[in-house]
Image (cartoon, helix red, strand yellow):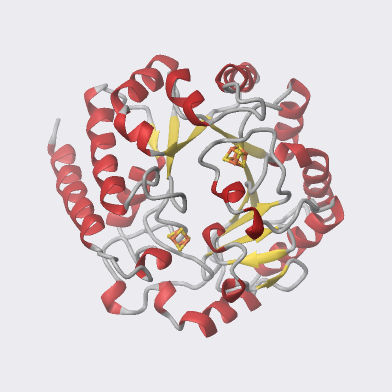
Amino acid sequence: MSDAIERVCLSVNSVCNLKCNYCYFFAKPEGLPGPASLTAEEIGTILDNIHRYSLRPEVDKRIKINFVGSGEPLLSWTAIRTAVEQLHATTPGHRLRFYMVTNGLLLTDTIIAEMKAIGLSPSVSLDGPASLHDHARVRHNGRGSHAGVMRGIARLRAAGVPVAINTTLGRNVVNHLEEYFQFIAEQGFEKVIFDRLVDVPDDVAVSTPEFYRALRRIAELKEAYGLTRLEIGNLEAYRRAIAGKPDRVCTMFGSTCGAGFNNIIYMQRDVYPCGRMFGQERWKLGRFDEPLERFPERMRALVGQQGCGSCASQQSVAGPDCLIERERPDYSSEPRKAFIQWFTERSKVSERLP
Ligand code: SF4
Ligand code: SF4
């Protein structure tokens, strides 16, 4: 397995126009890197460094750049747009691809046109129908955000932009998956990615066994609702892994942990292997203006090869499991293994169907 970085998350600020009650970034205020957002120039420095790294021989894919939060990226839209425009102008042959996860509230026709012009694909955070979404995703005044998010999605669709949905898989959504799928079917969404709710108190977090049970139920409901055109990003990741092409990113939305080796995150000016490690000094890999090749080297110094899966005991058909979970005293690889076994068998059966 290659150690090349294939995905870079960029958290450009730590401010948000929502106050979701499960937001783990704001649940640990002492861990946040501070409100000072990256400037266009600083984002440009990061993009230039990623571009230089993408020319290295070990990099076999175009690198995905995902603007995500410990805050809402559209609050820094001018800086992001300016930096990406600058990269296109100075380095037209670059091999970077741009994505953004937004809560959708600030999407305007102008911003959507600008996104299209710079080749940035947005996905919108939505937890299903208002009854589920507004349970957690609330504004600072406590009111639900569902109607506003749906207006943003309607604008994207009117502009012909394919809409991917990011859903936080909290206990409430897990307990109402049928209601969730009914809504997804009615809306005709084409792509959904579930993010397991972690690093919040145990009574609301979704445990590893619950997560894999939910993924199984999700696969069953997709079939039950006849949603053949709907792509569930998490299931697709396992399908690719079973076919021998695992995404080396994160078990939350992919099949394999790539923390620090294949996947890094800029928390404004500090670099970490993954967003769940933010604020923990022992996991800090460096600063925003350093060359990228230093980060996997430092990761190797921190954990040896265990993160990249060369250790046979950490390997499975899908690649290494979550590094953070593996460090927990109660860690068990069994729920993930059982899911992969079930999903592999099910995929074989589906392939045999006419
Ligand atoms: S939109 Fe994202 S960053 Fe903002 S409060 Fe909600 S979960 Fe946190
Ligand atoms: S350590 Fe866990 S949460 Fe972080 S990238 Fe790996 S799988 Fe994802």
Percent of width and height locating residue 75: 76, 38
Percent of width and height locating residue 247: 42, 57
Q: Quadrant of the C terminus?
A: top left
Quick check: 321 above or below 209?
A: below
Left or right placement of residue 287 versus residue 240 in this view: right
Q: 83 and 91: which one is in front? A: 83
Q: Residue at x 71, y 62 (%)?
A: 51
Ligand 2 placement by image quarter: bottom left
Q: Residue at x 62, y 64 (%)?
A: 279
Q: Quadrant of the N terminus?
A: bottom left
Left or right placement of residue 74 versus residue 57 in this view: right
Q: Residue at x 55, y 73 (%)?
A: 58
Q: Residue at x 74, y 27 (%)?
A: 113
Percent of width and height locating residue 209: 26, 51
Left or right placement of residue 272 versus residue 201 in this view: right
Quadrant housing residue 234? top left
